[in-house]
Image (cartoon, rainbow, N blue to C red):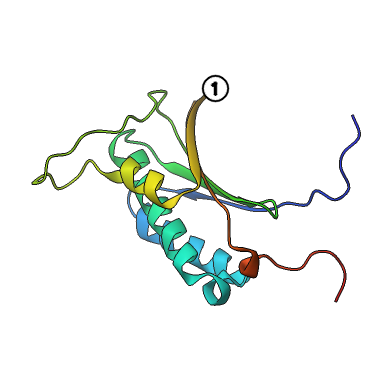
Amino acid sequence: MAQDPSLRAVGWARSLPISNGVKAARDWTRAHLASLGWDRTAPDLVDSVVLAVSELVTNAHVHARSNAQLVLTWDEQCLHVTVHDASTRLPEQRHAGDQALGGRGLFLVEAVADAWEARHCPRGKDVTACFEPPSSARPDTSGAG
């Protein structure tokens, strides 16, 4: 099977222990998005991605009681944010009451991401959110300058 030579992807991965993973995930994600220049060209998108990362890693720690593996993949169309944990139970959106302190994580992810999905893996599950940046935030990869 021939590969499309125009398809390029950049990715980063990090393991996040339960003890200190959420803040580390936010800081690490923000740094990688800055390397794409999005802190200047799409700061609202950066905030949305960081919020989703925070929610997904928190879910892995709290509900799966698992370390989390965070993978960011930029394929020039979409930033895929994937969090893997050891639980095979797929996440479900809960209907949190007005006074509830939690239970809104997936609603937030759905609100800020262009799409999201959860799928089983051999050793747990992956939850992936996709973020499509505005055209002004996409680097020129055409080679023209």
- Does residue 95 appear to the left or right of 106 in the view shown? left
Q: How crowded is mark 1: few (under 14 residues within 10 Å), some or many (20 or more)?
A: few
- Does residue 118 appear to the left or right of 51 in the view shown? right
Task: Provide the secondary structure element on which disc 1 rests.
Answer: loop
Give 67 or 63, whichever is nearer the viewer. 63
Location of residue 66 in the rendering, given as x and y in whole percent from the top left corner: 37, 37
Location of residue 12 in the rendering, given as x and y in whole percent from the top left corner: 61, 54
Residue most extreme to the right = 2
Q: Quadrant of residue 110?
A: top left
Location of residue 93 in the rendering, given as x and y in whole percent from the top left corner: 30, 33
How many numbered callouts? 1
Quarter of the image where the N terminus is located? top right
Give 31 or 103, whichever is nearer the viewer. 103
Work out whether 123 lies above or below 115: above
Is residue 33 something one can see in this rendering?
yes
Location of residue 138 in the rendering, given as x and y in whole percent from the top left corner: 67, 65
- Residue under the point 42% across and 59% down: 48
Residue most extreme to the left = 99
Give 114 or 21, whichever is nearer the viewer. 114
- Residue under the point 41% across and 52% down: 112
Work out whether 145 lies above or below 57: below
Q: In which quarter of the image is residue 104?
A: top left
- Does residue 6 appear to the left or right of 31 in the view shown? right
Residue most extreme to the front = 135
Q: What residue type is labelled 1?
A: Pro
Q: Mark 1 points at which residue?
A: 122
Is residue 128 something one can see in this rendering?
no
- Residue under the point 33% across and 48% down: 108
Work out whether 120 lies above or below 83: above
Quarter of the image where the C terminus is located? bottom right
- Residue under the point 29% across and 35% down: 63
